[in-house]
Amino acid sequence: METVVGVENSDEWKFEESGFFENSTSSLSSPKYIADPVVYKLVRVECDGRFVPATDDEVMEVEDFLVDDKTEMLVDGGKNAECSSDDGLPSEMLQLDSSEGLPHSGNVKADDEKLTSSLEEVVPSSALIVDENCKNLSGSIEELSKPSDEQPDSAPSTSDVCNNQKPDFYKLKGEICLDNLSIKELHEFFKATFGRETTVKDKLWLKRRITMGLTNSCDVATTTFTIKDNKLVNKENEESCKNAEGSVELEVETINNSNNSPTNCDAQMEDHNFVSGKRFNESVEFDFETEDLHAEQRAAKRVRKPTKRYIEELSEAESRDYSPKVHSSAKHVGFGSTSPKSCLRPVKSVSFNERIMLTRLDSLGGSGVQVPCVSRIRRSRPRKNIKALMRFHPSSVGMPTEVVRKALAVPSSRPDSVLMNRVSESISASEQIEPLLTSDAENDKQCSAIDRVQTGKSLGLKQTDSSEDTSDDNITTVPTVKGGMRRKHHRAWTLVEVMKLVEGVSKCGAGRWSEIKRLAFASYSYRTSVDLKDKWRNLLKASFAQSPPDEGMNSRKHASVPIPAPILLRVRQLAEMHSQMPPNLGSNSSLGGVSGRSSVHETRSGYL
DNA sequence: TTTAGGG
DNA sequence: CCCTAAA
C-alpha cells in the first residue's frame, strides 16, 4: 500500500519559489506574500514509511495541477496578473491574449484549450445576460441604490462616512468600509467573511484579508479599505484590469484615484462607471483561507515552537488544500476554470488513517522552522445510508468503533464523548480499505468523475467528499425523534459563500441549484443544493425587505455581520432579471417607504 | 435526482 | 434547516 503525499521541496519548481523567501520576511503587507512558500514534491510513501520518488506520471499530474492553479489566477483577471508578476513568475505566464481576452500561457499547453473553451462557455453567457439588461441595470441601479441608503446623497458629511468612529461599515452607501474598525469588529467581520475565527491582532492584516476575500482579488491596497460592489475602490490599475477582462460590463464601479479623500464616498456614488464584473475564482478565495493559517501564524508571534494543535491544524489545512492526495482538489473547482487533469489516484490506494510524519519548512516568521506535519486521511461522517444503518443497530455501535479503531490503529486523539463521530470516522475510513462496505454511491461518483476527467470534460469535480471532512468536523449530526438525521449546528453562511451564491445565480440563473452547487460550491460540500435554494430565498427576502438590516436594531451586538448592501442590491437585480420578485414587494419598494415591513418575524434573513 | 415550496 | 411532493 502506498500513497502519494506532498513533501516540501523548495527546489522543484523554480518559478514557485523564485523571489519568495527574500520577500517573505519583509513584506507582510505586500501582495508578494500571496504565493505560498511551500512547494511540494511528489513522493510515494510505502507502508514501511519509506519515501519513494514519484513516477513521472504522478509528477506530471501535479504539474498540471499547479499550472492550472496559476492559470486560474490569470483567468481571475488583471488584478491577479499583476499580483502574480510580483511573485516572480515567468512573464510568459502573465501574458494575456488580447484578441480573446483569454489567457494563453506558455506553460499551459494542452490544457489551455480546455480552459479556453470552458471560459467561453462562461463568459459569453454572462455577457449575454448583461447585454440584455445592461440598460435596465444602469437605470435601476441608481434607483435601487437609493432605498438602500440610509442617508440620501446629500453629502452625508463624507467625513462621517469614512472617518466615523463607529461607522456602519457594511452599508455605507453600498460600500463596505473597513477603515476605522476596531480589532474586535474586524474579527467579527473576518469570521463572517471566512467562517473562521482569527486571532491576528494586526488591523492591517485583517483588513487586507477581508478585503481580499470580498473582492476575490489579491491586489489589495494597503492604504484604504473600502469595498464597493465586491470590489475595492481606489485602484489605480482599474483601467488595465478592465481591459484585460474584456468588455463584459456588469457592475457599478467607480474609478477613483484619490486616496481616502473625504470626497471619495460621494464621488463613488455619483460616478457610475460600468466596468467588468465578477469573475469566478474559487481558488483565490480558497487560497486566502488556507494561506491565512500560515500568515496568521507569522503575524501572531515570532518564532514559537509549534504547538501540537498548530501542527494538527496546519496539517489539516494542507491535507485538505494542497496535498495532491486531494484529487481533483476542490480549490480548482469553479466557474470559468477547470482542472482537466486532476490527479486520478484512487482514494483506495491511500493507506487509511496512516499518519505520515513529515516535516516541512514552515516559514514561521520567515525563520525556517522545521515543523512536523502529520498527513492524515479524510475524516468524514458517513453517508446517510450508513448512518441509517447504525440507527437500527445502536447496540452494535460500540463494537465497530473499537474494532475498527484497533484495526486501523487510529490514535485516540479525541475523547470518545463524541461516539457517533468516532464511529463515523472509523467507518468512513474502513470504506477505504473495504470497498465492499461502501455503498456504490461514492464509487460511482468517483468513477464518473474519473470518466469525465478522462474525456476532458470534467468540471473538476471534487472527489466526492474528500475535503468535506475537516470542514465539517464540527457539524455533528443528531438523530431526531422521527428517525431522521438533523444537522445539529447551522453552519453560518459566510460572506464569501453568499457572494458565491449570488454569482452562481447570476451565472446559472436561480433555480439551477445543483448546477450552482457543482460549480461554485464544490468545495463546500456541506452546502446542499437545497441549502443554496433556501439561502437564496432568504437573500431574496432580505434584499427586498425595506432598507437592509436597518438601524432599528441599534444593538451593536449582532453576532453576525449583516449582509452588505451591495450584495443585497445584486440579489435584487438578479431577482428582477429573473422576474422572481417576491409578490407584493415588487419594484415599488422604492416608493413604499416603510410599507409594512412585511414581516415582523422576518427573522434575520438579512444577516449571515 | 433535482426543484419548488411549506413548515 | 427539514421534509415532501412533483417532475
Image: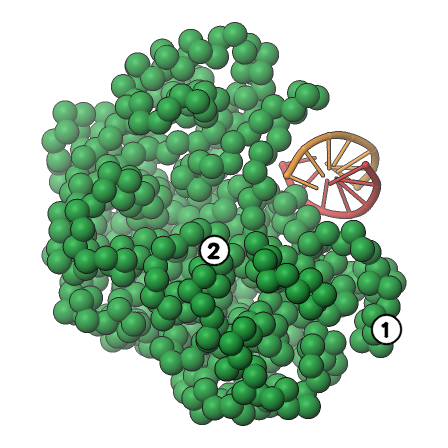
Chain colours: A green, B red, C orange
Query: Residue A455: image x %, image y %?
Result: 44, 47
Q: Check chain identity for marks 2 and 1: say if they share one.
A: yes
Neighbour tally class for label 1: few under 14, some 14-19, many 20 plus, Cα within 10 Å: some
The quadrant of the picture occupied by the C terminus of chain A is bottom right
Name the chain under label 1: A
Element at badge 1?
A: loop
Q: Can residue A119 be seen in this view?
A: no
Amino acid type shown at disc 1:
Gly
Amino acid type shown at disc 2:
Lys
In the image, taking residue A47 as reference, residue A547 lies left or right, namely right
Query: Residue A345: image x %, image y %?
Result: 32, 37
Residue at left 18%, top 51%?
A304
In the image, taking residue A66 as reference, residue A227 lies left or right, namely right
Neighbour tally class for label 2: few under 14, some 14-19, many 20 plus, Cα within 10 Å: some
Quarter of the image where one finds residue A28: bottom left
The vertical placement of A71 against B6, above or below, is below
Q: Is residue A29 visible?
A: yes
Residue at left 63%, top 49%?
A532
The vertical placement of A123 against A200, above or below, is below
Element at badge 2?
A: helix
Residue at left 54%, top 73%?
A166
Q: Mark 2 to mark 1: distance in Å?
A: 34 Å
Question: Which mark is on residue A592?
Answer: 1
Q: In the rendered structure, which disc, 2 or 1, sits on the residue that comes first in sequence?
A: 2
Residue designated by label 2: A191
Query: Residue A74: image x %, image y %?
Result: 37, 69
The vertical placement of A344 against A566, above or below, is above
Name the chain under label 2: A
Of the pair A87 and A309, the residue shown nearer to us: A309
